[in-house]
Amino acid sequence: MLSRLLPPGAGFRLAMGTLAVLAFLLLAGPLATVVWVSFFQGKIIAFPPEGYTLSWYAAAWEMPRFRGGLATSLWVALAATAASLAAGVPAALYLARTEFRGREAIQSVLLGPLIVPGIVAGLALYMFLIEAEILTGVQFAQTMGGLVLGHSLIALPWTVRLVTAALVGMDRQAEEAAAVMGARPLAVFFLVTLPAIRSGLVAGGLFSFVISFVDLEKSLFLVGPGTTTLPIAIINYLEWSVDPTIAAVATAQIAAISAVMIATDRVFKLTRAF
Amino acid sequence: MSSIALTEVTKIYGGQATVDRLDLKVREAEFLAFLGPSGCGKSTTLRMIAGLAIPDGGHIRFGARDVTRLPPYQRNAGLVFQGYALFPNMTVAENVAFGLKMRKVGKPETAERVARALDLVQLGHLADRLPRQLSGGQQQRVALARAVVYNPEALLLDEPLSALDAKLRGEVRSELRRLQRRLGLTTVFVTHDQDEALAIADRIVVMSAGRIEQTGTPGEIYATPANRFVAEFLGMSNFLPGRREGPGRFRLATGELLGYGCEGARAGGHALAIRPENIRLLPGRGAEADGHSLSARIEEVVYRGSLVEYRLSLGGGTLTVHRRNADHDPAERFEPGETVTACWRAPSTILI
C-alpha cells in the first residue's frame, strides 16, 4: 500500500501540493492563454495557430482608441492615486488616533466597495455627478475631473485601510521623542510619521493605481468623448470584432501593471505591507 | 541647566487623580529618581514635565520659566524612553542630529556636536549605521546622545534601562551617571527598580497612588523609611506588630516592651520595622546580648551566595535575617529546627 511505503504525513503533503498546483493553473491559465493568443498570426482566432507574429502589437499601437485609452487610463490612475493618498492619509490619521462616536460605523462604511457591486457603485456615482451638475450648472459627468473623482472615491477605502494598518503598527514614542527634541507637529508628521508608515503609503498607492487602471464597471458611466479609458476602449472594440489585437492590448495592460508592481517591489518589499 | 519645580501638579484620568497635588523641586544638576510601583503616577509626572501631558492643575517651572502649558517642542528638554524610540529610517548620526536640525544649527557645527555627543557614549565608530543594526545597549546610548546633544534644560529618563539585560544595565547605568555628572544635567529618572534608584540617584522620590510617600537621599530612605509602604517597597523589612506606648517605647503584640531608634515621618505607630541585615543570631535560648533579643526557631535556611537568609518563627510571626557569608564561618551557621536568640540594637529599629 502507498500509505505503508511513504513516511507519515507524505500523503497529506502530496494532496496539498497537487491542490496548490491546480489552483495556480486555474489562476494563471487564462492569463497565459491571452498572452499566447496575442502572438497568433491569423485574424480569426483558431487553435492550433497558423503561425506567430508580433504584428498585432503594432496594429494596436496604430489605433488611436487604444493609444488614447492607455494615456487616459495612466493619467486617471495617477491622479486618482494622488487624490486618494492626499485625502486618505489625513482620514486614516484621524480614524486611527481619535476616539469619537461613530468611528466603528465609518470603518464599516469603508468596507463598502467590497460589498457593493461595481456597476451599482458606478451608477450611484453617475447619478451623484448629474445631481451636482444640476445644482451647480458645472458639468461633472463625462469629464476628466468626474472620472478622476470617481476613481479616487473607489480607491480611497483602500488607502485609508492600508494607511490605518500602518499607523496602528507604528511606534508612537518616536513621534513624542521628536516633539520633545523640538519638532513642531508638521515636522513630526513629515520627518517621523510619514517615513514610519511608508509601507502603508506604498501599498495604498499601488492599490489605488491598479484599481483605477483596470476599472471597467464604474467607468462605464463616467467616461465621455475624449475620456475613454483603456478597459472601455477594449469593451467597445470587442463589440464589433474579435481578433488578436485585443489580446495584444490585454497583454500590454498586464505588462503595465506587472511593471508597476515590480518597480514598487524594487523600492519597497511589497510582502512587508500585507 | 535649570531647576525644575512642580507645584500642586495634578493629572486626572477617568475621574481619578493619577497625580495628586504633587509638590517637588529638582535642583540644578541633580539626579532625581521617581520610584514606585506601576500605576503610581511617576511616568505621568515625567510626561507632564516633558510636555507630552498637560496637567489638570498646578504649575511646572524650568528655572523661572513657567512651562505648564507649553508644547513639548518649546520646552527644551531631553527625553529617553525605555523602548529607545529611535527613528528607524535615519542613521545614528542623523538621529543624534535631529534636535540640532530642529534648532536650525548650521551644518558644520551640527557635525561637530554630533561627533562629540557620540564620542561621549563611545559610539563614534557607528555613526553611519541604522538603529536596527545596533544592539539594545548601543541603541539606548544613541537615544541618550540624541537627548543631550542640544544641551537641554532637563534630561528626562523613562525606565531607560528596563529593556536591557542585567549585565548591560549596570554598564549603561554607570555610563549614564558619568555623563550626567560631566554635563551637569538636571535629570529626572523614572524607575520601578529600587536597586537602580538606590545606585544612581542623588535623591529618590518614592511615589504611590499619585502621591509622594517620601523624598530623600538613597541612604535616608533606606535607613529611615517614612512609613510602611516605603519600608516594604525599598529593600526588605521585618515588621513587628504592636503599639507605641510613649516616646521610644513600643509594646509588642506578644507583650515584650521594646525601644526603637526613630519614628518614620509618616508613621502609623502599629509596627516596628527592622532590616534583615541588622539582626544577629546567637545560639540557644535567652543568650546574653546588648540591645533587644527575642527567642526564635529557625524554620528555613536559604543559601544566597554572599549571604545566608534565615527564616525564623517567633511568638507572633516570622522574621527574616540576613547574615553575611564572608569566609563561610561554620560557627555562624544554623540548621532548621535550632532554637536561637535574635538580637539587635534599638537604634536600628524604626517605628512605622
Image (tube, grey):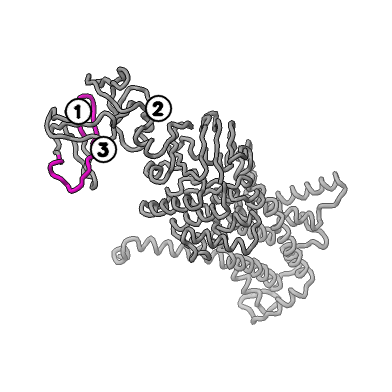
Instruction: Determine the image quadrant of residue A37.
Output: bottom right
Does A198 appear above or below B266?
Answer: below
Residue at (70%, 76%) from the top-left corner? A57
Q: CA distance from mark 3 to mark 2?
A: 22 Å
- Judge whether residue B330 is colored magenta: yes
Q: Depth check: A94 or B146 in front?
A: B146
Residue, disc 1: B293
- Badge 1 marks a residue whose secondary structure is strand
**Kind of residue indicated by mark 1:** Ser
Marks 1/3 in contact by CB < 8 Å: the verdict is no
Does A51 appear above or below A259?
Answer: below
Dot placed on the residue nearer the N-terminal end, 3 or 2: 2
**Residue extent of the magenta highlight:** B311-333
Q: CA distance from mark 2 to mark 1?
A: 26 Å
**Kind of residue indicated by mark 3:** Glu
Residue, disc 2: B265
Residue, disc 3: B277
